[in-house]
Image (spheres, grey):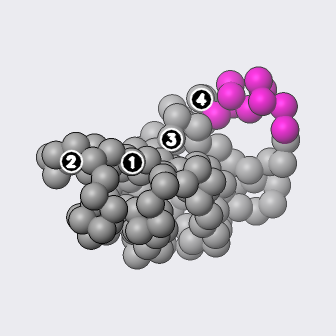
Amino acid sequence: MGSGADVASSGAVAASSGAKDDSADDSALSSKRFVYASFFNRLKRRVFEHWAPQTARLRHRATEAAVEVRIQLSRSGALAGICVITPSGSSEFDDEAVRAFQAAAPFPDPPEGLVGKDELITFPFTFHLTPE
């Protein structure tokens, strides 16, 4: 993505089940990421259309940064929640990540297999700012 900005979904993509067994979760997350790749690729493209890190770059003067957010979607694809779980060190950059997801929502046709016991689709998503 030639602007020096990159939006990348995290290696872990999963339905929230409330389970805390990390080894079992890692295996399940990997298989879900593969099976539902088309949905997550559509989601990534849609978020990237709204991603504008230039202001954060100018204010923070950062050459590199990364922020990880946790996303919750409803069964219909509406944004049910978003929070920063690994901040970048720049509140402007973190805020831009949240804003991009809010602007891109809703995300049509989420796969039923991603819906967790809490009736939500929950997954991490990482935004990267790379040198231009």
Q: Give the amino acid type for the residue marked by disc 3 in the picture.
A: Ser
Pointer 1 residue: 65
C-alpha distance separating marks 1 and 3: 15 Å
**Residue 106 in the image, given as x and y percentages of width and height:** 48, 72
The residue that appears at 80% across and 48% down in the rendered structure is: 17
Q: Give the amino acid type for the residue marked by disc 2 in the picture.
A: Gly
The residue that appears at 51% across and 41% down in the rendered structure is: 10
Pointer 4 residue: 30
Magenta stretch bounds:
20-29
Say whether disc 1 or disc 3 marks the residue closer to the N-terminus: 3
Pointer 2 residue: 4
Say whether disc 4 or disc 2 marks the residue closer to the N-terminus: 2
Say whether disc 2 or disc 3 marks the residue closer to the N-terminus: 2
Say whether disc 1 or disc 4 marks the residue closer to the N-terminus: 4
Which of labels 3 and 4 is toward the front?
Answer: 3
Q: Identify which residue, 7 or 73, lies in the foreground.
A: 7
Q: Secondary structure at mark 4?
A: helix
Pointer 3 residue: 10
Are discs 2 and 3 less than 8 Å apart at CB? no
Are discs 3 and 4 less than 8 Å apart at CB? no
Q: Give the amino acid type for the residue marked by disc 1 in the picture.
A: Ala
